[in-house]
Structures are given as structure tokens and as C-alpha cells.
Amino acid sequence: MNYQIELKEQQQKKHQATSLCLITGFAFMGIGAFTFLMGNADWVKAVFHKTIVSGVLLAICSLVYGLVVLYLIFFKAKWSNQRTYLKMIHAIVGIAFAFVFFLSHWWLAASINMIIALANLFAYFYEQKLAQPLFVTINEKIILLPATARRKQLMWAEVERLMLRHGIITIDCTDNYLFQWNVKNSTVDLEAFEAFCRAKIEANRSKRQTEEW
């Protein structure tokens, strides 16, 4: 027997996306404001004297971009959260700023911008991953879990209970791990499915690892 159960599409938690946008906006604003306010200091002039971009111009660009990001999250939150490509834009802009700061030998600003860029890149690809169809595949030998799960597969000897009820698939493991997902409309015969799972669990019960005292 082989069962392939499709899961409902998962969405990134809104507060995570909002937090990342806030951090991005405030980081750009902070770096830009600090550079602008300290623009007349000798050490700031020394930092930027070799670059083709003046410190003041770079500060204004960073400050303005930070304001734009914060405006979108405060006044256009619903619109911006639906545009995952904005995270890629934040990443590209962050890398560009990091590159200029790196050429200017301003390591702290370069590091902060690169961290912001990498965080937005990770968020972008993570959201793309969530949008892909996810499945739990169950067969005679193994249980294959979706790509977003903490584990990728389970042996039957690791499973204590497996149920598909009320649109939710539940996998209770022998080591107290619990996996639960909402499933799409399934045509699986529930009685036959659970009978198959119970039989496989019982057949592999003797293979479980036992503690040695």
C-alpha cells in the first residue's frame, strides 16, 4: 500500500514578516541617520575619502530607504506582506550598501547591512518553500515527511500512533515527538488507512529500541 496525503499550504506567520520589515527599516534608518549626523567628524570624512560615493549622499539614501520600508509596514502592511519579492529587493539593496561600506572600510555598517540582506534572502526562499505542495507519503517501509518538518522520514518502529481525522493528520512518535498538519480534501478510506497504520505499527513494535539499564 502507498498513501500520499497532500497538506494544506502553510503561511509564514504575520508577526515574523512584520518583525523582519521593522528590523530592516530601523537598521537602514539608524545607519543613515548616524552617518549623516556625524558627517562632519574627521573620522567619518577619513572613512569615505577614497570612495566615489560621499558619506552624506550614502547616509541620505540609507535614511530614505529605511523610511520607505517603515512606511510600507505601518501604512501598507497588508499589501507589503503579500509581495514576497519585496524581501528580495531589501536583500539586493542591503548587499549594495554593504559593498559600498566595505569599500569605505566601515566594517560595522557593512556587517549590519549584510546581515539584513541575508535575513531577507532566507525569508524570501523560506516563503517560496512554503508555497510548494507538501505531502506526507506512507508506504510499507517508511513514512516520508514534508520538507518543512523537523525530520524527513520516520521508520514504523518510531511511530506510536498515526491518525487521519477531522482534516488533520497526527503522527505520535515513541520519543514523544508529535507531528500534526492540516490536510486538503482527501479521498482516502479512513478505516482502511488507520487499519493499515495500526497493523504496521504493531508489526514493527518488536524493532523498537529499548533502554538498557
Image (tube, rainbow, N blue to C red):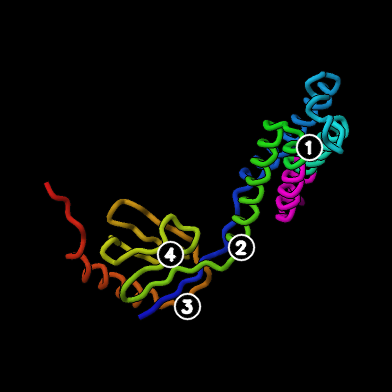
Residue 55 versus residue 81: which sits nearer the camera? 55
* Sequence-first disc among 1 and 3: 1
Q: Secondary structure at mark 2?
A: helix
Q: Secondary structure at mark 1?
A: helix
Kindly report which numbered mark, 2 or 1, lies closer to the viewer in this rendering. Answer: 1
User: Is residue 34 in the magenta section?
Assistant: no
Kindly report which numbered mark, 3 or 2, lies closer to the viewer in this rendering. Answer: 2
In this figure, which residue is indicated by the disc labeled 4? 145
What range of the chain is rendered magenta?
A: 76-97
Which numbered marker is on residue 66? 1
Residue type at numbered disc 2:
Ala
The spot of residue 43 in percent (x, y) is 78, 21
* Sequence-first disc among 2 and 1: 1
> Residue at point 41% right, 58% down?
151
Q: Secondary structure at mark 4?
A: loop
> Residue at point 67% right, 31% down?
108
In this figure, which residue is indicated by the disc labeled 3? 187
What's the distance in space between the residues labelled 4 and 1, CA to CA? 40 Å
Kindly report which numbered mark, 4 or 1, lies closer to the viewer in this rendering. Answer: 1
Kindly report which numbered mark, 1 or 3, lies closer to the viewer in this rendering. Answer: 1
* Image-quadrant location for residue 144: bottom left
Residue 10 versus residue 61: which sits nearer the camera? 61
Q: Is residue 148 left or right of residue 31?
A: left
Residue type at numbered disc 4:
Leu
* Sequence-first disc among 4 and 3: 4
What's the distance in space between the residues labelled 1 and 3, CA to CA? 50 Å
In this figure, which residue is indicated by the disc labeled 2? 131
